Image: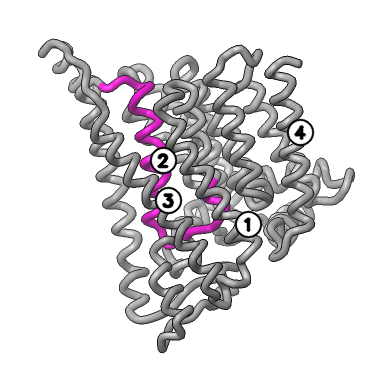
Amino acid sequence: MSRRAVLWIAFAVVHAGVAWLGFLMPNEPMGDVYRVYEPWSQQALDGRGIVGITEAWVYPQLALVPMVLAHAFAPLAGYTVGWAMLVTLMDAVAFAMLVGRGLSTPRVTAAWFWLTFIALLGPVGLYRLDGLTVPLVVIACLWLVGRPWVASMLLAVATWIKVWPAAVIAAALIAARGRRDRLAIVGGAAVVSALTLGAVVAAGGAAHAFGFVGEQASRGLQVEAPIAGPYLWGALLRLPGFSVYYSRELLTFQVTGTDIDVAIAAMTPALVVAMTGIAVLGVIKAVRGVRFASLFPALSLALVLGFIVVNKVGSPQYLVWLVPSLVIGLVVRRHDWIAPAALALGAALLTQLVYPVLYAGVLTPEPVAVTVLTLRNLSLVALFVWMLVRLARLPVPVRTHAAARAAVASA
């Protein structure tokens, strides 16, 4: 049996198994699908209003598209299974492009990493919008060098579904090989954004075009976020004023405690500063001539991890954001990326233990669950620091002064 056949058998087993586990595990790991995605999309189909158009919404407007598309599979076994089928189909397209004929060892390694990650993270990676954006970003990363226009448009579509792929666009723009590729990346993203905003305005949703930005800015500290750790431990130790509570407005669990408003207010500026600093470091490396194959995976993963680590929100599905950068890293520099990929797999397993397995022990804090969540967050912080150090240490090729001046002009 060929390596490709074995991979595709594993693909089917992993996706079917993870989809099935969603119905067996506690704490409703696929609850978002039938509690929010289905009602939102059904409301639009029934003509009772369109989220993001007739009312403010927590997601960008294109997020509604896959929610509606999942209804095409619903007659087979219901909307929840239909959603799992849609995500599996999207994964299959990206997986086929990654694996090809199964002759490339780096691509096969990347494919096995992706499947292992899906299995270790569990149902939350399948039954969330984030899981649907991953194959789009994987395809885009594979096409960035040969088809920058198409890659940029795919990344823009993914960004208008969930914001996180904007980090990958930024990394691609900084690491691009020359002015032509940078123009293509900007142009592709601009075209998709213009078409999306044009459609929103034409539908009468101009007032809510960027409503998702305000919705995110108004959030408190979500219980799983790294910054929430001290408050969660305070709740576990029963310190006065520290607790976990449910936000009915945002449909998520948050923490509170001493000086919580200061921490909430500081997180958005901290995120901006962190992302700007990482981008500047990437620009410095690009100007000095670091090649795309070395710069892009490290820079994109550092930016994505910045989105996770320096964030008020820390939903378990955010772990899937790590996949595209690690996949492309394994494809272009397999031996350099095996260790970071292994750490990411460990973080995925800890995340599944936190949610859905031990989640009740997070909400009514218990020592084991809080400790596992803390270890998960520390592993993400460690990977973030690792990528920053790797980015800073990327070797600069020796070149002439004329070549350096040309690179500065291009950047």
> Which residue is denoted by mark 1 in the rendering?
51
In the drawing, does residue 374 fall left or right of residue 405? right
Residue at 29% in and 34% down:
391
* Spatial separation of the CA atoms under disc 4 and disc 2: 30 Å
Three-letter code for the amino acid on which mark 3 is drawn: Leu
Q: Earlier in the sequence, mark 1 or mark 4?
A: 4
Q: Residues within 10 Å of mark 4 (few under 14, many from 20)?
A: few
Three-letter code for the amino acid on which mark 1 is drawn: Val
How far from the left and from the top, in percent, is residue 330? 48, 26
* Spatial separation of the CA atoms under disc 3 and disc 2: 17 Å
Q: Secondary structure at mark 3?
A: helix
Q: Nearer the viewer, residue 380 or 64?
A: 380
> Which residue is denoted by mark 3 in the rendering?
380
How far from the left and from the top, in percent, is residue 398? 17, 14
- The quadrant in which residue 408 appears is top left
Q: Secondary structure at mark 1?
A: loop
